Image: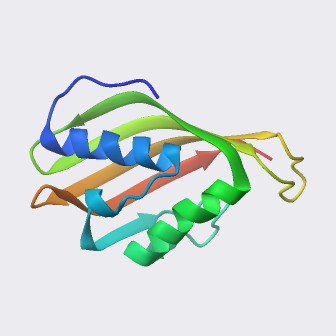
Amino acid sequence: MKEAPNVSPAVDLALAFVKTVEAGGDILGLVTDDVEEEELPNRVFAAGARRDLPAMRAGVERGKTIFAEQRYRVFRAFGDATQAVLELEWTGVLAMQLGSLAKGATMRAACAFFFDTRDGKIARIRHYDAFEPF
């Protein structure tokens, strides 16, 4: 993952979040207990998705079984004390066959993530994921 310059506390948290997810780590220390994630409709989740903290943590764990590797390449990061926006590319190398995709295939998505923070932790994430055809 390309590191962006330190521009705000919220950006620092957002970058730490994607780095932790990329590594399959635990997001617990980065988010509030009542954190909310909203994933807008896309090719994987046609109706979109809303997740609370347990669902977010379960998703990170599930990702470790589906993907042999996940990477985030940050193109742009900006924000202020309580909000951050990241423009990035996500890639995931499959650890198993998924639909018509063979084990070892790479999935890609252009993403925009919007973070709201409270008391030094991430309280809300809203993201748009534009997956390449698969």
Left or right of 130? Residue 9 is left
Q: For the point 27% across and 59% down, which residue is it?
A: 29
Q: Residue at x 35, y 39 (%)?
A: 86
Residue 16 versus residue 36: which sits nearer the camera? 16
Question: Vertical placement of 121 versus 84: above or below?
Answer: below
> Does residue 52 appear in this view?
no
- Where residue 119 sits: x, y (%)? 9, 61
- In depth, the one of 122 and 42 nearer the eye is 122
Where 54 sits versus 24, above or below?
A: below
Q: Position of residue 22 (x, y in %)?
A: 51, 44
Colouring of the image: rainbow
Residue located at (70% from left, 41% from top): 132
Q: Residue 64's quadrant in the figure? A: bottom right
Q: Is residue 94 visible?
A: yes
Residue in the image at 13% along x and 51% along y = 82
Left or right for 60, reference 79: right
Residue 41: x, y in percent? 56, 64
